[in-house]
Image (spheres, grey):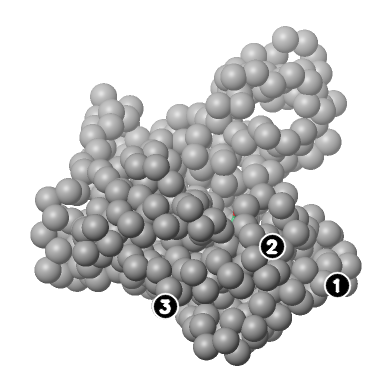
């Protein structure tokens, strides 16, 4: 039994990015996880033939070293997706504020920073901590800041003085409570006002009540008005023209609200907007920061929502055949504790078994039927693309990293925890 040590936010980063912030370095947690020979497998095993052909990009040569179920990431493809994201916003990385929820990994965030992206969106305090520790200049907590999270957020601001933090709000009582706590400590919190542009999940409707809320925010002690936040996850029509028309209708009142606020002398410094399906549309609105998250890893669900955007799948799930209860059926070690299962099947698309029928799915088992199941051997590794990569990542403590066809490294999914240190 070997031991792999994961050090969250390497010292190099802490030194270069957060100089003068000793608590960061003191607070670095070190994760020691027992892994059976995960890093030992440099010996190449023979590539399998059969259902999966030799030229497939996702195959690894050291399958026998990799436990299943597991997520594998392909950093070359991730970097190409990041380049493509920057192209979509016209070549200016400051037009991106990608959501980190998709990957929850400091290493992926660093790949984004390497290409000039330095502001990030988060939905948990742990994601905020990971992002700041990995070197983000700006971190937006795009989730209502309530209860003990107010204190935790303030603690982050103190721990990472080189990072600018902001949160979102859609409610006077909520932001006033947080602002009072901040003011009592001689501090302040920058809030972007969260707008409900039709998704009806969070946010305030872009009408006169939103104008009044933003004015109160601008005048509050302990709070600063930092702009507007809009997430339009309800817009995922596969036809681009239909989606664009729906998006245009949804954003008109928001753009009008911005005009009214500015006309009243209220600064609207930032607009952080959208997800993957509307990313290219928002890119056309000057000054908007696009907050798509999924393109970096991609999955097979997204192209249904935006077939016109071409990103590479950069995350694969691997599973093994664990039983063959009859001639046409195999059982895989891919239960719903290993793959996002909030949607109907197919929750994964297996390479070479695209016509699979999904029979049963339980905590640790997935049973599929396929006319070609016969030749599959017990213990054989099967590769697939998850339908929804974001929740899939949160189900895995660490993910394999594939370079040159070899799974040679593991990255801890550090922000899957609800709490890192703060
Ligand atoms: C608030 C918010 N912003 C941005 C995103 C990223 O969207 P996408 O996954 O389409 O890239 C999400 C996704 O759920 C979200 O909830």
Residue at which label 2 appears: 205
**Between discs 1 and 3, the one toward the N terminus:** 3
Q: Which mark is residue 116?
A: 3
Front one among 91 and 177: 177
- Disc 2/disc 1 C-alpha distance (Å): 19 Å
Other-residue count near label 2 (Cα within 10 Å), few / some / many at <14 / 14–19 / ≥20: some
Q: Residue furthest top?
A: 325
Residue at left offset 65%, top offset 45%: 388
- Which residue is depicted at the point 83% across and 36% down? 355
Mark 1 and ligand 1: say if the CB distance to the nearest ligand atom is below 8 Å.
no
The percent coordinates of residue 308 (x first, y second) are: 78, 69
Instruction: Look at the numbered disc 1 and give the secondary structure of its residue.
Output: helix
Q: Quadrant where the N terminus lies?
A: top left
Q: Residue at the location (62% across, 52% down)?
A: 202
Q: Residue at x 58, y 19 (%)?
A: 364
Judged by depth in the image, the label closer to the viewer, 3 or 2, is 2
Q: Is residue 190 left or right of residue 349?
A: left
The answer to whether residue 267 is visible is yes
Circles 3 and 2: CB atoms closer than 8 Å = no
What is the crowding at mark 3: few (fewer than 14 residues within 10 Å), some, or many (at least 20)?
some
Give the alpha-carbon distance from disc 3 to disc 2, as whole Å: 34 Å
Image disc number at residue 352: none
Q: Secondary structure at mark 2?
A: loop
Is residue 42 found left or right of 141 in the rendered image? left
Quadrant of residue 207 within the rendered picture: bottom right
Marks 1/3: CA–CA distance = 32 Å
Q: Height in image: 168 above or below 281?
A: above
User: Which quadrant does ligand 1 occupy?
Assistant: bottom right
* Residue 288, quarter of the rendered image: bottom right
Mark drawn on residue 245: 1
Where residue 378 appears, as percent x and y from the top left, is 61, 19
């Amino acid at each position: 039994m070997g031991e792999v040590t994961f050090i969250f936010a390497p010292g190099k980063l802490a030194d270069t990015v957060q100089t003068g912030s000793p608590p960061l370095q003191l607070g670095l947690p070190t994760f020691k996880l027992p892994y059976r020979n995960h890093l030992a497998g440099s010996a190449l095993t023979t590539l399998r033939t059969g259902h999966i052909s030799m030229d497939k990009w996702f195959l690894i040569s050291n399958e026998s070293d990799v436990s299943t179920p597991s997520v594998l990431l392909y950093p070359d493809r991730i970097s190409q997706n990041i380049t493509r994201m920057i192209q979509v916003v016209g070549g200016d990385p400051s037009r991106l504020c990608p959501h980190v929820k998709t990957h929850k990994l400091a290493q992926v965030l660093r790949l984004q920073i390497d290409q000039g992206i330095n502001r990030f969106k988060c939905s948990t305090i742990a994601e905020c901590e990971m992002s700041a520790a990995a070197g983000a200049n700006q971190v937006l907590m795009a989730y209502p800041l309530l209860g003990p999270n107010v204190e935790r957020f303030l603690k982050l601001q103190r721990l990472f003085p080189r990072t600018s933090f902001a949160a979102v709000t859609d409610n006077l009582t909520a932001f006033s409570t947080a602002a009072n706590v901040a003011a009592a400590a001689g501090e302040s919190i920058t809030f972007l006002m969260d707008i409900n542009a039709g998704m009806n999940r969070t946010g305030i409707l872009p009408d006169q009540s939103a104008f009044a809320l933003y004015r109160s925010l601008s005048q509050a002690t302990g709070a600063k008005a930092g702009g507007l936040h809009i997430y339009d996850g309800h817009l995922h029509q596969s036809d681009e023209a239909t989606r664009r028309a729906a998006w245009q209708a949804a954003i008109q009142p928001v753009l009008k609200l911005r005009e009214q606020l500015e006309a009243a002398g209220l600064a609207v410094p930032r607009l952080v907007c959208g997800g993957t399906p509307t990313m290219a549309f928002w890119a056309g609105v000057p000054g908007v920061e696009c907050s798509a998250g999924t393109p970096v890893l991609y999955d097979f669900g997204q192209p249904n929502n935006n077939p016109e955007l071409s990103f590479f799948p950069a995350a694969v799930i691997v599973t093994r055949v664990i039983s063959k209860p009859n001639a046409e059926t195999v059982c895989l070690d891919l239960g719903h504790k290993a793959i996002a299962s909030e949607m109907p099947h197919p929750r994964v698309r297996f390479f070479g078994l695209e016509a699979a029928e999904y029979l049963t799915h339980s905590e640790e088992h997935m049973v599929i039927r396929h006319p070609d199941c016969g030749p599959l051997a017990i213990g054989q590794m099967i590769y697939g693309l998850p339908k929804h990569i974001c929740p899939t990542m949160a189900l895995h403590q660490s993910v394999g990293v594939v370079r040159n066809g070899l799974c040679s490294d593991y990255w801890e999914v550090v922000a899957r925890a609800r709490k890192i240190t703060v």
